[in-house]
Image (spheres, coloured by chain):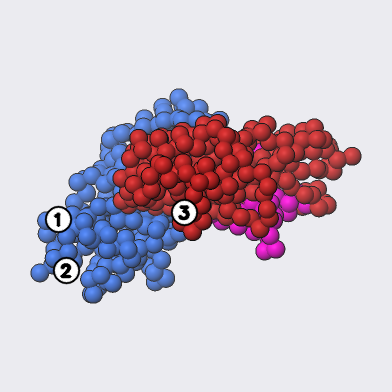
Chain colours: A blue, B red
């Protein structure tokens, strides 16, 4: 009999080609499935809550897998998997979950963080971990613009096409906190779900707005679907994005 | 006429083979000299305050170089050099200095920081940036042991041989602060100078002491030269070490 294992994993996005399995097999999902196969002796499919892109980091991504070896206790799974995984990918915690638990479909919300470095020189240890935007972004303007995205909206103008049609593009952003600490600007998104590249497209638009390139009214029009500006959409780079938490 | 330029540089230690120039030319000094050569048109020698090892990070290393192009102002040098350097190595500031200023010989002190991760699982974004020591290190014991190193001592038992004989091994540690923040232990050394691998050998000994493997008395004996334990010396890994500041 197999049991469903729930995993909390963290990774540095830089060395991997994103979450989702690919033919070259250097994705987070691939590394996890290889580790499971080594320990379990048979193929195990790993389902993640969110398919993060190449370069996007995770502080606490959630995943599940059905494992045959029911004698191995969750704490032992953590050590066994980490023994097989590269150090840039770690299993933080494991627990057995109900059979109907699904990392992706059971999720009721996610928290993403986006980090921007506004200083003129990017510190080397922040390379690949922030968006270097050496500009004088007006914090009050950024906060006003961010408030426009709060609540329930059709975010189809803030989503990239993933090759398949997403029919329901309505999402709710419950909170969007904007904080400054020295040269670091942090935007933290708490929502029921996020479309493909949604956070990065919103951050790109907010940066353009805070930098004075577009008006708050333009953002509002784009969000309400009054204007469609496919060509001018700026997605903030992947390295500044962190999946912080998945809510169930 | 040439002018002496003082540089403050920062780097991620991971991608470089340390500070000092080597035949393969992937050191911090090599990258800086190549950048100067490109801008200046002639060979420029760069002198660093401390020759950090491979893997050791710098938040504010200091260096000097004599540049022929006296019309280029310091702020322009920052931008010009950074335009040539890899992103893991940045010039933070430049200024013209007196002809007798020497990055290494004018230095009157340095501050080094060492970071230890004591939790059982090492977060991926800390990989290469801390020493992963999943142990229950007694903070009070660590502080008591650290206090033994304060002041003026002959540190020859806490120095590695660099291939040349260092005759004067007496150094003064003015402050050694031990702090804990969650799973991170930070040891910050402020001293008039440090011998080769001195910080890493002291941290190695402190960790053994805090973990109960050696007694504080053993440390004291080793420091006073009463015992010589060449074989058992543990150097803490390079990735946890940061050159924080050079004092003049």
Q: Which residue is mark 3?
A: B234
In the image, residue B151 sits, relative to residue B63, either above or below, namely above
Q: CA distance from mark 1 to mark 3?
A: 43 Å
Q: Are marks 2 and 3 on the same chain?
A: no
* In the image, farthest residue toward the bottom: A41
Q: Quadrant of residue A203?
A: top left
Q: Position of residue B121 (x, y in %)?
A: 32, 52
B157 is higher (above) or lower (below) than B95: below
The numbered disc on residue A69 is 2
Left or right of A217? Residue B134 is left
Q: CA distance from mark 2 to mark 3?
A: 39 Å
Residue at image point 43% right, 50% down = B131
Marks 2 & 3, CB-CB < 8 Å contact = no
Total numbered circles: 3
The mark found on residue A97 in the picture is 1
Q: Are marks 1 and 3 in contact (CB under 8 Å)?
A: no
B53 left or right, relative to B25: left
Q: Nearer the viewer, mark 1 or mark 3?
A: 3
Q: Nearer the viewer, residue B112 or B195?
A: B195
Q: Is residue B131 visible?
A: yes
Question: Callout 3: helix, strand or loop?
Answer: loop
The part of the chain drawn in magenta is B8-37
């Amino acid at each position: 009999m197999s049991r469903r294992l729930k995993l909390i994993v963290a990774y540095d996005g830089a060395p991997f080609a994103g979450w989702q399995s690919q033919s070259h097999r250097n994705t987070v999902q691939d590394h996890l499935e290889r580790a499971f196969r080594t320990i379990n002796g048979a193929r195990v499919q790993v389902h993640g809550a969110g398919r993060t892109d190449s370069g996007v980091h995770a502080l606490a991504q959630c995943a599940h897998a059905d494992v045959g070896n029911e004698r191995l206790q969750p704490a032992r799974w953590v050590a066994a998997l980490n023994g097989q995984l590269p150090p840039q990918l770690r299993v933080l915690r494991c627990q057995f979950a109900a059979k109907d638990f699904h990392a992706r479909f059971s999720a009721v919300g996610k928290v993403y963080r986006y980090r921007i470095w506004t200083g003129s020189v990017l510190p080397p240890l922040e390379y690949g971990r922030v968006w270097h935007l050496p500009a004088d972004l007006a914090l009050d303007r950024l906060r006003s613009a961010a408030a426009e995205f709060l609540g329930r909206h059709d975010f189809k103008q803030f989503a990239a096409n993933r090759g398949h049609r997403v029919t329901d593009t309505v999402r709710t952003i419950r909170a969007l906190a904007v904080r400054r600490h020295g040269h670091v600007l942090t935007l933290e998104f708490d929502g029921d779900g996020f479309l493909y590249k949604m956070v990065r497209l919103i951050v790109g638009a907010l940066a353009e707005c805070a930098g004075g390139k577009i008006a708050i009214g333009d953002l509002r029009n784009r969000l309400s679907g009054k204007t469609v500006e496919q060509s001018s959409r700026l997605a903030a780079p992947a390295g500044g994005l962190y999946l912080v938490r998945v809510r169930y």
